[in-house]
Image (tube, rainbow, N blue to C red):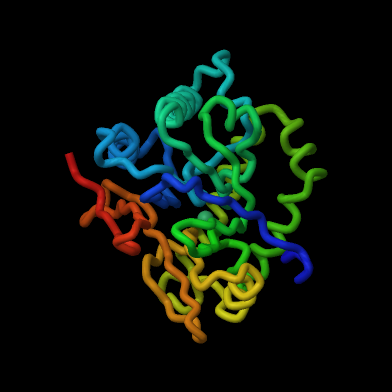
Amino acid sequence: MTAPLTDRFAELHAPAHWRAVEFISDLHLQASDPTTFAGWQRLLQRPAAERADALFILGDLFEIWVGDDVLSPTNRSSESVFLRHCTTLLHDLSRHTPVFFMAGNRDFLFGTDGLRASGMQALDDPTVLDFMGQRWLLSHGDALCLADTDYMRFRAQVRTPAWQTTFLAQPLAEREAVARGLREQSEARKRSHAHDPTLWADVDTPAARQWLQRADAPMLIHGHTHRPASHELGDGLQRVVLSDWDAAASPPRAEVLRLSAAGLQRLPLKTA
Ligand code: MN
């Protein structure tokens, strides 16, 4: 799962003119949640004065992505129309603001056609961002939830080129059915653990510390767990967890993490 210690993590060096960057993750965009979509659209279409110099999407932007062929105009399902609309909005933003995309466990099949359609630049998981004279380790976070051994086995399997080639060769409707099944399984598991939050897999502290030491970075920024917080990991190491988005919940959950000379700020989404 993790690369040998001698391997270096991918690195992204911020251009010298960047003053602020923003991170979001776990929006789980889907046609059936227009409220969250509307909030996200407002974020993308802010006036220039409010925007950061780059937007980093750290996984699970989409509730599910079963292959880039959902973007084909011959696909008239409401979900396909919705996803095409999302990629068009991203492409509009990418004309003036770089948008970086790291895959999550829901949208790891987002591929080169999706990147082209959305104007986003792919990031490895993890990636070290070199910005403001510091190193920041970015990840979706699922690879560090080691206690969920079933999921770790599943992850190792579905991230292989062989599994993906076989899966993508199936007709779109079959892939959508498989995805629905997996989602129901995962929801059922969450429900069965709902009575005891300690059973929800969280980021493994020793593994996070090991990644940070290897990255020579003091801070890990990640999503996935839907538990926004900042954690001290010892020896000056920290991890900061992004909020998931559910703008229809009360109170609404939707937040941008902004990094600038002012430090890290959690900015709640402005409601319309
Ligand atoms: Mn996730």
Residue 201 lies, in percent from the top left, at: 53, 71
Q: Quadrant of the C terminus?
A: top left
Which residue occupies 33% across, 39% down? 40
Q: In front here: 130 or 168?
A: 130
Q: Quadrant of the N terminus?
A: bottom right
- Determine whether 113 is above or below 2 in the image: above
Relative horizontal placement of residue 177, taking residue 265 as reference (left or right): right
Residue 38 lies, in percent from the top left, at: 29, 35
Residue 49: image quadrant is top left
Q: Residue furthest front?
A: 16
Which residue occupies 56% across, 24% down? 71
Residue 137: image quadrant is bottom right
Residue 77 lies, in percent from the top left, at: 49, 22
Q: In front here: 74 or 68?
A: 68
Which residue occupies 75% across, 54% down? 157
Relative horizontal placement of residue 235, taking residue 173 as reference (left or right): left
Whether residue 140 is visible, yes or no, is: no
Which residue occupies 62% across, 45% down? 108
Residue 206 lies, in percent from the top left, at: 60, 81
Residue 195: image quadrant is bottom left
Whether residue 22 is visible, yes or no, is: yes
